[in-house]
Amino acid sequence: MEYIRLVDEQEKLAFRIGKSTIFYRRYDSKKYREIERRHTRKGPNSRSGEENIKVDTPAINDDLLDYMIIDWENIQSPIPPHKNMDCTTENKLKLPADIRLALVKRGNGETDEDEMEEEKKTSPSMSDTP
């Protein structure tokens, strides 16, 4: 990594596994808090009367994944004839758990240069020139 790149919702990074590619963007703390707020409920504890905060972590992860994944190529149905599937919210949530986890981790961190390859081809803002 030559430079640290700030997070921008217009970025388009490539996560390649075999012949499949998932195009995604990272998320910043503002986006994360926005999603977390949607899935956080406050209310009184029925026993103590104190305020309880309940966070629906799986729903947060699902929304992060939906936000992060912009598009994909060569993601196929598990059922023969294994046709390519559209990049929809429903299909994003059907990705294997290890792929979803890897994407959420990438969404919150710096990326490797090879992941930036697709963006470098399409955007001068992601080039290696300062």
Image (spheres, rainbow, N blue to C red):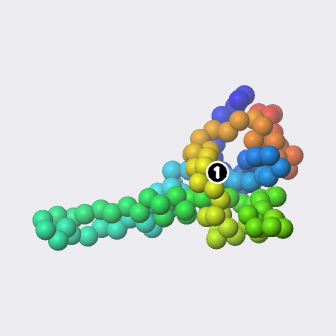
**On the rendered image, what quadrant is the N terminus found in?**
top right
Q: Is residue 19 above or below residue 81?
A: above
Q: Which residue is at a point 64% across and 71% down the rendered structure image?
A: 90
x and y percentages locating residue 53 in the rendered image:
30, 62
From the viewer's perspective, is 54 left or right of 108? Answer: left
The foreground one among 102 and 113 is 102
From the viewer's perspective, is 33 left or right of 62? Answer: left
Q: Residue furthest top?
A: 2
Sort mark 1 into few (<14), some (14-19) or many (20+) by Cα contacts within 10 Å: few
Q: Which residue is at a point 71% across and 60% down the rendered structure image?
A: 70
From the viewer's perspective, is 40 left or right of 15? Answer: left
- Residue designated by label 1: 99
Is residue 9 visible in the rendered structure shown here? no
Q: Residue furthest front?
A: 80
Number of numbered discs = 1
Is residue 128 visible in the rendered structure shown here? yes
x and y percentages locating residue 98 in the rendered image:
60, 49
Q: Is residue 3 above or below residue 77?
A: above
x and y percentages locating residue 97 in the rendered image:
59, 54
Q: Which residue is at a point 84% across and 68% down the rendered structure image?
A: 81
Q: Secondary structure at mark 1?
A: helix
Q: Which residue is at a point 51% across and 55% down the rendered structure image?
A: 32
**On the rendered image, what quadrant is the C terminus found in?**
top right
Type of amino acid at the residue the image marks with label 1? Ile
x and y percentages locating residue 6 in the rendered image:
64, 42
Q: Residue furthest left?
A: 48
The foreground one among 62 and 127 is 62
